[in-house]
Amino acid sequence: MTSGGTTPAPPSTPSTWRPWEIAWQEALYGRAGFYRRPEGPAGHFATSAQGIPGVGELLARAVASLAARHGLRHVVDVGAGRGELLGRLHDLDPGLALTGVDVVERPCALGESVAWVRSPGGPDLPDLPLREPALVVAHEWLDVVPAPVVELDEGGSWRLVEVAGDGTERLGDAPAEADLAWLTAHWPSPGEAGARAEVGRARDDAWESLCDKVSRGLVVAVDYGHERSSRPPFGSLTAFRDGHEVAAVPDGSCDLTGHVAVDSLAHDRRLRQADLFGELGLGTATPAYDLARSDPQAYLRALAARSAFAAATARPGLGDFWWVLREV
């Protein structure tokens, strides 16, 4: 894809072409999907939960602080990966009841006190064994709920983008009426041929389904996202492999992701990570230099904690993450 529109596709049999939403689902959650690979996401990129020194611990503190603020003692991590966040929450507060939900088998490294539920993957969710009330957190989950990808044709109409197994694309039919209605409400046409969007209706529905599974508590989505005033003109579908951003190819070899239209999600509050972490008081003061002489290890720990807070709240950067909160 170029900024001028989708590159014309070479001749191909119709069976090789699929709407991006279907190809995306299979590439991530199918039998040979990316999230079922043995190395897991941590083998390819760093997230706030893993791979960035100190930030995983800070994320756990934020989740635990929200749970405490709302009087919740059960935390459910949807899209838990290999249990990185759950492990840190257990270390932080062994008294918390913890449950992970993901497409893979229970990670061996998790303690036996942490419950685990297999998920079909994508927007489909299993029943959650909630010990009510609960805090349910979906960290970087909605951005990997597959969504239809659409593009404006020369006539100014939205068309589905279809993709072959090698990443080659072409324009297909018009989107479903419900998806067109979502675009009209949340992602109005910019009028330029070649402009793109990811239809967020599937993410909205997945969010509603998750919230419906909680009878009382707090549901939190954490993700990179955008609002109506800042929609990316050519969409945000991209891919990552081995620590690098790569072309989006639905072959199971890379993570496929697209930013979330956070303002279309039903919520009580939404705020940036930098603002939430400040509100929760997670920052630390610069340690006094005298501490370096009296207790060098404590001094280094304090410096590391301050460095992690700076990384987690940097803007642009991790501080731009949206936290969408909904009380049930």
Image (cartoon, grey):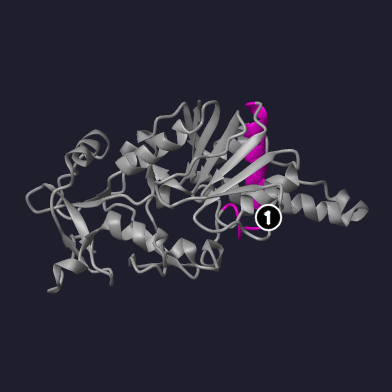
Q: Main secondary structure of the magenta part?
A: helix
Q: Residues within 10 Å of mark 1 (few under 14, many from 20)?
A: some
Magenta includes 205? no
The residue positioned 83% from the left and 50% from the top of the image is 289
Residue 181 position within the rendered picture, expressed as x and y whole percent measured from the top left: 20, 36
Q: Residue 109: give x, y in percent of width and height.
A: 68, 59
Count of numbered circles in the view:
1
Near-viewer residue (46 or 33): 33
Q: SS of the residue at dot 1?
A: loop
**Residue type pointed to by label 1:** Leu
Left or right side of 45 for 167: left
Identify the image quadrant of the N terminus.
Answer: bottom left
Residue 198 sits above or below residue 251 on the image: above
Give the residue drawn at x 63%, y 54%.
84
What x and y, as percent, mark residue 98? 65, 42
* Residue toward you, 296 or 145: 145
What residue is shown at x 40% (from left), y 46% (from top)?
Answer: 124
Q: Nearer the viewer, residue 169 or 136?
A: 136
Disc 1 designates what residue?
A: 110
The reply to whether residue 312 is in sight is yes
In-image side of 33 versus 115 (left or right): left
User: Residue 179's quadrant in the figure?
Assistant: top left
User: Compared with residue 324, is residue 144 higher up or lower down, i.e. above or below?
Assistant: below
Residue range in magenta is 48-70
Which percent across, then down, holds residue 42?
56, 63
- Is residue 52 located in the magenta-colored stretch of the structure? yes
